[in-house]
Amino acid sequence: MKGKKMVMMKIWWAINFAWIFLFSAFALVIGIRSGDAAGIVQTPDVKMVSFIILGVIFLFVVMIQLIFLYFIRKKTKTMIPTK
C-alpha cells in the first residue's frame, strides 16, 4: 500500500503546483493591467482590493488542500496492516 500513498502524494503535489501557477498568473495579470474588461482604469486602490480578494481565495484553497492532505495521510496510515 506504500505505492498507493506515493501516487496520491504525487497527485496532491501536482495539483498544488497547478494552483500556485494559476494564482501567480492571476496576480501578474492584476499587477500589470491598466484597465479591466469594462474599461475602468485600475487605480492602486482597486488593484489592492483585487489582491486582497485573490489572497482570501488563496487562503481558502490552502485550507482545502491541507484538509485533503490530512485525509490522505490518515487513509494511508489505516491501510497499512498491523502485525
Image (tube, helix red, strand yellow):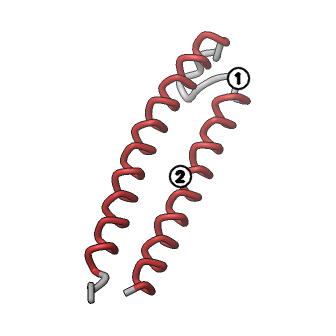
What percent of the width, then of the height, locates residue 56? 45, 29
Q: In the depicted view, which residue is nearer to us: 68 or 19?
A: 68
Quarter of the image containing the N terminus?
Answer: bottom left
Q: CA distance from mark 2 to mark 1?
A: 25 Å
> Type of residue at label 2?
Trp
Q: Is residue 50 left or right of residue 74?
A: right
Residue name at image x 27 percent, y 84 percent: 82
Residue name at image x 36 percent, y 48 percent: 64
What percent of the width, then of the height, locates residue 4? 40, 83
Question: Which residue is denoted by mark 1 in the rendering?
Answer: 34
Q: Secondary structure at mark 2?
A: helix
What percent of the width, then of the height, locates residue 60? 40, 38
Q: In the depicted view, which residue is nearer to us: 40 or 19?
A: 19
Q: In the rendering, which numbered label is found on residue 19?
A: 2
Residue name at image x 44 percent, y 35 percent: 57
**First-in-chain label (2 vs 1):** 2
1 up-or-down from 48: above or below: below
